[in-house]
Amino acid sequence: MLKHTYIKVFSFSFLITLLLKILTESIKLIGGNFNSFFKRVGVADLIFSQPASGFSQFYDILILLTYCFFLFLLERKYYYILNNKYFVHIKYITFFFGLVISASTIVFQEYKAWDLNPYCQEYPINEVSNSKLDIYKTEYNGIKPGLSPLVWIAINKICNFTFFGLNYLNHFYWIFIFSVLFLIKKNLGFNSLDTLCLAFCFNLSYIHSIRSANYGFLVACLLSVFLLKEQKKNKNFNLMIIFLVSILKIHYLVIIFIYFVILKQKYKFIFKLATLNIIFYIIQFILFKNSTINYFINLLNGYLVNELRIKAGIFNPVTFQFFERIEFFKTFSTIITLTIVVYLFNKFKTIELKFLTFTHLFSRNKSYDQNYFLLLINNENINLFILILCTIPTIFYIYGSLFGLGLLSELYHVISVFFLIFNLEKSKFKKSNSTTL
């Protein structure tokens, strides 16, 4: 029975990945006006270049206000919308949009593998043992490296591994989507349509990973799945996967700490994970003393918070920057954010809302990193998550690709998450009242 389940999930993930491949090949063959539409969506130049060069501030503010007004109207009707039998059609449309955006991005994105490229070069990785060279002062195509020496070496080997003429660097997006489909479908218990929406559209994280080759899309899914597994049953395998995630994305240690220490009080697990991390970095220090020291200096000098404050566009959902963009609040942005977080943390009773509140303030918070939100999704609230963090972002992404989005596009997601936090609380209240009645 267990093998049968794995075969079904494998087949589902493979067929959807194949569907994406067929769509990409079809887009390549389509010419004329259709091709120009797909190209504009695939490149999304009006999201990533125009914000940095001078999108009309008037229209930028107008779009943001329109979005806020839309959420205001939605707030009055969302409970009815989410529980309407026709909401399934919104999910189909969401998946279709996500599929089209993904295929178009694979076909037309000219700057693939931004985040991966620095680690795939033979130089300076060959100099990792050179005590006179700081390898973290190098860059490739404007991207500076930020991984520890051993992780850097491992990724370099993967980049340069070829199997039957295929290499990872040019095919990572198929690996990403297949793996995430498999992880979500097998471990989180969602139906096929919900799985498709979450894999293709959630926070636009897959789209971001196609552009940048950042493995955070896959790693954050692994983090969510195995934190949930560890919560249910203590196993060394869970610990090892979470350890792997933490060394790949060191800032995820903060997420893990909040989840297991502040909210779950599982101190034994954190002690084991901390021990593994200490051993891992001691080994690196012994092997590559100079490079390991430079790695930590690089972290302290800003890598942990090195978000692209302009060109990341809709993919850069950082709450601190929400207030930084408002001139009146700029000086006090940190104080304002922390005050709101402390207030909301004390206000809400449920662990999900406390977790959302705490984790959403971090500067190191790209869309692909936010797949840890999967920790909070269950069958009771999945429609709200899909509507706010899948449907609406894909619509805005297509609009922005065709007509442009300005500097404030980074703020849409921040507003969405606050909307989500308040309405998760409200939906729980409504459900408890309806159950009582």
Image (spheres, grey):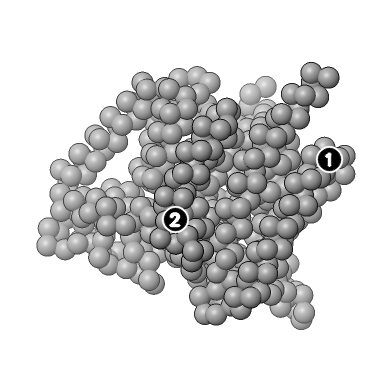
152 w.r.t. 236: above or below: below
Q: Looking at the image, is mark 1 or mark 2 nearer the viewer?
A: 2
Question: What x and y, as percent, mark residue 241?
Answer: 43, 34
Question: What x and y, as percent, mark residue 238?
Answer: 45, 28
Q: Which mark is residue 371?
A: none
245 w.r.t. 292: above or below: above
Q: Residues within 10 Å of mark 2 (few under 14, many from 20)?
A: many
Q: How far apart in space, not on screen, are marks 1 and 2 (Cα)?
A: 36 Å
Amino acid marked by disc 1: Tyr
Residue at the image point whose x is 47% and y is 49% from the top: 337
Is the C-beta separation of discs 1 and 2 under 8 Å? Answer: no
Residue at the image point whose x is 27% and y is 52% from the top: 300
Q: Residues within 10 Å of mark 1 (few under 14, many from 20)?
A: few
Placement of the C terminus among the 4 image quadrants: top right
Going by the image, does 202 lie left or right of 370?
right
Q: Is residue 334 visible?
A: yes
Going by the image, does 299 lie left or right of 117?
left
Q: Which mark is residue 80?
A: 1
Dot 1 or dot 2, earlier in sequence: 1
* Residue assigned mark 2: 333
